Image (cartoon, rainbow, N blue to C red):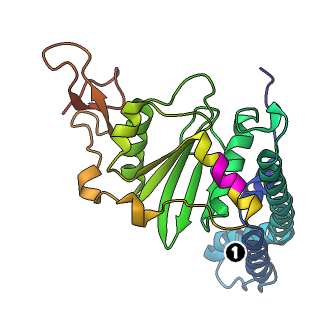
Amino acid sequence: MARRRKTSPFEDLIHIASLLPWWLSLLIAFVAWYFLHSLAISPIPTLTDPKQFGQMLTSQLFRTGAMFLQYILPVAFCFGAIGSVFARAKRRKLIVDVASATKPGKTIEGISWQQFEQLTGEAFRRQGFTVTETGGNGPDGGIDLILHKDREKYLVQCKQWRSLKVGVTVIREFFGVIAAEGAVGGFVVTSGAFTAEAKAFARGRNIQLVEGAELNRWIAASRSTQSTPSVRTHTQINPVPVQQVSVPSCSVCRSAMKKRTAKRGASIGREFWGCSQYPKCLGVI
């Protein structure tokens, strides 16, 4: 595997800014310049007591730092705003290409997992959600998108699995993450399908499972009619009260616990809470 190119802090800052809405990056750039410029031109205090020398030296160091950062930070966020505009245009083109795909490489099954996450995020934006991309943790990793709508938070996990169905274990773990993150609900989106057990577990809970066929309908509707595809939000998800889905802490090491299913012994097939640090910690409830 090719090693990732090492980036500078300035490049990392531009990348972070590019993940934000362009207007927010510009706002941060202005606020940063105003604050740092005010600090850089503030008068140097007069030394009246030798004991204040250290304080004056620290104050001067802050002014010197502000003198450089008043240009560096705004420039980074301005570049990030430009990157955000181009990235949004790229995502819009991606959703058009997939909607009108005539080649396998442009379908939701044929694009890369990074493009699949970007495509999913753009589909949710067209439903009126504010979308934050977490940067991607790999083809199987973590929470990929964070959605906000009507002051409520939703989580999204993307699974571009071509050869197998998404099973119930993924949905159980995702359900625990929703509770731990304080989200109202969540969506698991796959280019394929879900097992019957996964669908049964999600039914009645605050999780919506989106299969490839439904995602394709969202994309086609957003392109052909420019109307809002029928994404069920919190009014249909039936959020579970927080106290019913709270994740307990391990009594041994205080780490968060995970729902597990017994695979042997007298309790085989039953669910229980096991420590997330297993096998290092054997705490159970």
Residue 65 location in percent, x, y?
78, 66
Task: State the residue in front, 220 or 275.
Answer: 220
The residue indicated by pointer 1 is 56
Q: Position of residue 50 (x, y in %)?
A: 66, 76
Judged left or right of residue 53, residue 18 is right
Residue at horizontal 42 percent and vertical 56 percent from the top: 185
Front residue of 165/32: it is: 165
Which image quadrant: the C terminus? top left
Residue 157, magenta (yes or no): no
Q: Residue at x 27, y 25 (%)?
A: 261
Start-end of magenta stretch: 216-220
- Residue 186 in view in this figure: yes
- Residue 231 higher or lower than 116, as above or below: below
Q: Quadrant of the N terminus?
A: top right
Which structural element holds mark 1?
helix
Q: Main secondary structure of the magenta part?
A: helix
Q: Nearer the viewer, residue 5 or 204?
A: 204
